[in-house]
Image (cartoon, helix red, strand yellow):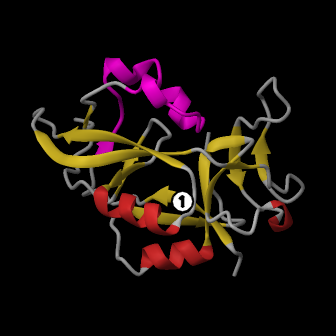
Amino acid sequence: MPSFSILATSNDPGHCLIDEVPESLDSKVWRIAAGLPMEHRYPNHVVLPMDKGHKGLVVPDLVSNTERIAIVSTRLKTLLEQHSGARIEFLPVSIANHKGRIAAKDYFIANVLDHVDCIDKERSEVQELDPDPARLSGLFRLQVLEDRIPAEANLFRLKPLPPAILIRETLRARLSAENLSGVRYIEMGEKCAIY
């Protein structure tokens, strides 16, 4: 089994979906999707509204969203702090239900700050429309060059496409043992669509 997979959200229709961020974060969320530090730029009291067109109401440990960010529960945050070894900014959020009432407090956007350039372009399926040749516009199948990944890297962003967060098998096993909700893994070589 390959040592890495892509961390993704499950497709459970009962789980909520976040499809927008509040105006206070709208012009800055790209920084999080790119894995750039927010520091003082992060606003206070961020509330993420559930998509009203999506019927799911359950708030899982890893929340599906269209903003290309990782939204995690306190439980998943604690596990990542204890076992990932990664540099992660945890930015507090609350999640509002379809009626605008707070459905979940104590959630966080996990802004992973570590990036590793380890893609095997020969064996991966990618889209290269970005004017910067070091960046990818899309990823449809991933294979990595494991010798480029530091031995201590358990959780990191794919440098040419930062919304793709990779997880080492040992950390994946630790998370899987906790029966976290909303978590799915995309295996190396498995079809995907990440932009």
Residue in the picture at 24% in, 57% down: 14
Instruction: Report whether 14 appears left or right of 91.
Output: left
Is residue 51 shown above or below 157? above
Secondary element at tag 1 = strand
Q: From this viewpoint, is residue 182 visible?
A: no
Q: Magenta residues, as a range?
A: 17-42
Residue 117: x percent and y percent? Answer: 79, 49
20 falls in the magenta region: yes
Location of residue 183 by image quarter: bottom left
How many numbered marks appear? 1
Identify the residue position indicated by label 1 in the image: 7
In the rendered image, the quadrant that contains the N terminus is bottom right
Judging depth in this view, the residue of 85 and 10 nearest the camera is 85
Residue 29 visible in image: yes
Q: Is residue 99 magenta?
A: no
Name the residue at the right extreme: 122
Q: Position of residue 59 (x, y in %)?
A: 24, 54
Residue located 71% across and 35% down the image? 137
The amino acid type found where label 1 is placed reads Leu
Q: Residues within 10 Å of mark 1 (few under 14, many from 20)?
A: many
Identify the residue at image location x=53%, y=27%.
30
Tell me if 186 is positioned left or right of 135 in this view.
left
Give how far across and how far down residue 118 sits, in percent.
Answer: 80, 55
Quadrant containing the C terminus in the rendered view:
top right
Residue 130 to residue 136: above or below: above
Image quadrant in which you'd find residue 48: top left
Image height of 185 relative to 117, above or below: below
Nearest to the observer: residue 55 or residue 157:
157
